[in-house]
Amino acid sequence: MYSFEYLVSEIKRKKSFLCVGLDTDVSKIPSHLLTEPDPIFAFNKAIIDATEPYTVSYKINTAFFEAAGTSGWESMKRTFDYIPKQCFKIADAKRGDIGNTSNQYAKAFFETLNADAVTLAPYMGNDSLAPFFEFEGKWGIVLALTSNPGSADYEQQKIGEKFLFEHVVENTCKLGSNQNLMFVVGATKPEEFGLIRKYAPNHFLLVPGVGAQGGSLKDVVKFGLNQSVGLLINASRSIIYASNSHDFALKAAEEAARLQFEMADYIS
Amino acid sequence: MYSFEYLVSEIKRKKSFLCVGLDTDVSKIPSHLLTEPDPIFAFNKAIIDATEPYTVSYKINTAFFEAAGTSGWESMKRTFDYIPKQCFKIADAKRGDIGNTSNQYAKAFFETLNADAVTLAPYMGNDSLAPFFEFEGKWGIVLALTSNPGSADYEQQKIGEKFLFEHVVENTCKLGSNQNLMFVVGATKPEEFGLIRKYAPNHFLLVPGVGAQGGSLKDVVKFGLNQSVGLLINASRSIIYASNSHDFALKAAEEAARLQFEMADYIS
């Protein structure tokens, strides 16, 4: 149970709408952690401890944990359990399947891992997403316009008068409200935020692509901010891999603080 | 490493192009298995032993294992390890993300779990799928036209002169060949197989929707069969839940044998 109102209040309290992305790759973490019983969790724990003052959300990229198999899933569980409950916990899993299967994914992320939200891929249509919106107090975050060049292949193609991503936002709004539905919109496409806001003026948008992918925070705010802030800006690699040495957590905190400082200006 | 030629030879040897779907829901398996140390694996093992003579492939629906958390992931690993190497092992995971993340998913399924193939969701475009095709001897199976009603929302919408699913098949063919690329096409849409075959005449199609979802094997064969057979017909619930009692494996074998018997007629 993580409400819209609580998220807005946390954003105002911390003067931050940052989401720290935990794309934890065991081949990239500082070597001194490799002797820990669970190096992936040890890394995440240190990053969470260091960045928590500057962020309202953590996004766990499930792929990086699944790559390590059973032990990776255990590290993922430990990480979800460790994140303070004040922070909005996102499973970045991009799931979506026929109804009975989506229901199982919803159980995996909302019940077994106790995530507040899960990212969803809409290709199979609304009935593939609907089961995720049947969990009280949990959120679905649907891919609309992503930050990668491949977004031009389908997302930015027109069906009738509208882009596919516009149809996705319009249709998905039938499944939930701004109390349980967000959209993924890449920071590399700031000029398209207006089109998204046409259908989802009051929803939060989860915005990856600031940092390693080159998107601009200033532009995202210019085109995407609404009265409730309505943005969660994700940065992953630029924060968690700010240093590869013993000072990695300190450097991660510095980078998170730098983004938070820039964000504070935009929060009234 | 599982080659196109080997798959075709196994289909001819067994006179079957059946894929048994392991959507193993712990709440649906016979209650006498619940005292086993790993009930999900015990169920899968019995199903595999009973159905192996009649099937060339197993499709593991990752959602059902993820719902059980770490122990579910362990059951999934045991199941992949147990499937005889003559059978084509599919991770039905419907993944797809930006490149560095898709690469991690590919490692999870192709290396950690040693699947031969993984199903992929194309919403984010070709660059989100490309990393899966960089693993020698491994396969990507891309969602084209799915069996659920929601396929009308986007898949069956027109971009220019073609349906979205046609664009997906056409574009994805640039990433691989019939030696490492298949498409998911629902059995509930047999009349659309001709459109898929226009772009992928020599590829295998993975066809869910026969059985519980109501698709017809006869119609799928009529519109989808090619010179190498080119079809893997999946049945999940109609086989694995044919009985909920002590005879569940026997009844699963009977249902698999019934489908195999029907398929034998179509294999020259």
Image (spheres, coloured by chain):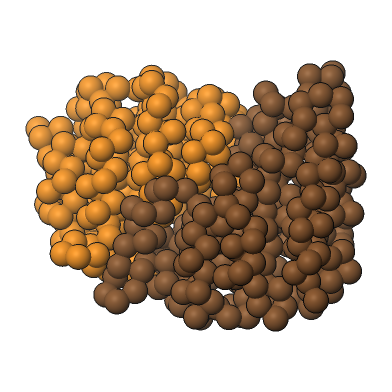
Chain colours: A brown, B orange
> In the image, what residue occupies the spot 22% across and 47% down?
B170
**Relative image position of residue B65 (x, y in whole percent):** 61, 45
Task: Give the side of residue B150 with respect to residue A234, left or right.
Answer: left
Quarter of the image for residue B190 reads bottom left
**Relative image position of residue A210 (x, y in whole percent):** 62, 51
Task: Look at the image and tell me in which quarter the C terminus of chain A lies.
Answer: bottom right
> In the image, what residue occupies the spot 55% across and 39% down?
B101
The mark total stands at: 0
**Relative image position of residue A253 (x, y in whole percent):** 84, 43
> In the image, what residue occupies the spot 74% across and 50% down?
A20
The image shows residue B143, relative to residue B76, as above or below, that is below
Quarter of the image for residue A69 reads top right
The image shows residue A117, relative to residue B256, as above or below, that is below
Residue nearest the viewer, comparing A112 with A49: A49
Q: Is residue A198 visible?
A: yes
Task: Give the side of residue B225 with respect to residue B185, left or right.
Answer: left
**Relative image position of residue B231 (x, y in whole percent):** 23, 41
Q: Is residue B148 visible?
A: no
The image shows residue B31, relative to residue A3, as above or below, that is above
The image shows residue A267, relative to residue B212, as above or below, that is below
> In the image, what residue occupies the spot 50% across and 46% down?
B97
Task: Look at the image and tell me in which quarter the N terminus of chain A lies.
Answer: bottom right
